[in-house]
Image (spheres, coloured by chain):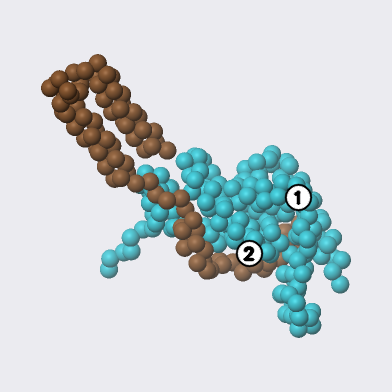
Chain colours: A cyan, B brown
Amino acid sequence: MASLPEAPSDAELITRVLVRDDRRAFGELVARHQSAVRGLLRRLTGGDVAQADDLAQETFLRAYRGLRGYRGGAKFSSWLYRIACNVFFSRDRGSRDAPLEPPALEAGSTELALPDRVLERHDLEKALALLKPRERAALVLTYANELTHEEAAVVLDCPVGTLKTHVARAKEKLRRQLEEVP
Amino acid sequence: MNVRDDEAWLDTLLQRQLPSGSSDDGFRARLLERLPPPPRPARRVFGLGLTWLVGALVLLLPSGEGTGVFASDAGSLLVPCCLGTALLWYLVDSLR
């Protein structure tokens, strides 16, 4: 039985984009990483799907334009996360350290009618929205995107010690917020 | 709550926050449409070739005295300058 051809690695696809401006190869990179990047941005924007997708589009456009700057030292996904975080932080420089507006439940929904998981998710999004952007990013990168502290520190361009402080503060605030939920 | 429970609690919450592996929803197609237009090397080569051809024709055209433009003082500077400019333009354009 003939074995399936091996899927090209990220590095091979990047080379194709750089050498031949192969847009299919770039499309393949997008297909591989869009879910993680959009997920990260959805968490960072407090569950705002439309805004997260706009920022994700901007992230991949910047990645395409700056692909020559990718040195291959870090994982490609980490490089994308770094761009995504920068896009998120630069969305509004003025509100860089200001918490987001907590998200509201959809109109017409009552707590009784919603399953526990939805309520739990809403509570979490509300609590995450109250964190400072850098704390939120540190927490999301290390827990939801499962980066090590070292990788997350590279993504956020800060020392590992600072990253750990952000994570610890975020966890503490999150725990307090969620304990207050009746 | 011990450290391990604490980690598991947060992990579970954040994993639950969004379903993993969100579908494409046309995201990739929209993005590929927004990419800058591809450079057109064939068109550039055609432009360069045409410029050289026009330059060469000018060289061959007879001037008023029955000799080629290249023989006159002005022509001897003008034509190589035009061809050099065309080459420079091509190189700069292809390096963008």
Question: Where does the image place residue A44, in percent across and percent down from the top left?
Answer: 68, 57
Quadrant of the drawing holding the N terminus of chain A: bottom left
Asked whether, in this view, residue A87 is left or right of residue A175, the answer is left
Can see residue A26? yes
**Crowdedness near tag 2: few (<14), some (14–19) or many (≥20) residues, C-alpha within 10 Å:** few
Q: Residue at x 32, y 31 (%)?
A: B86
Q: Residue at x 76, y 50 (%)?
A: A95
Work out whether B23 lies above or below A66: below
Query: In this figure, what is the number of numbered marks?
Result: 2
Secondary structure found at label 2: helix
Work out whether A117 lies above or below A155: below
Q: Residue at x 24, y 16 (%)?
A: B73
Asked whether, in this view, residue A2 is left or right of residue A7, the answer is left
Work out whether A77 lies above or below A119: above
Q: Residue at label 1?
A: A95
Q: Residue at label 2?
A: A50
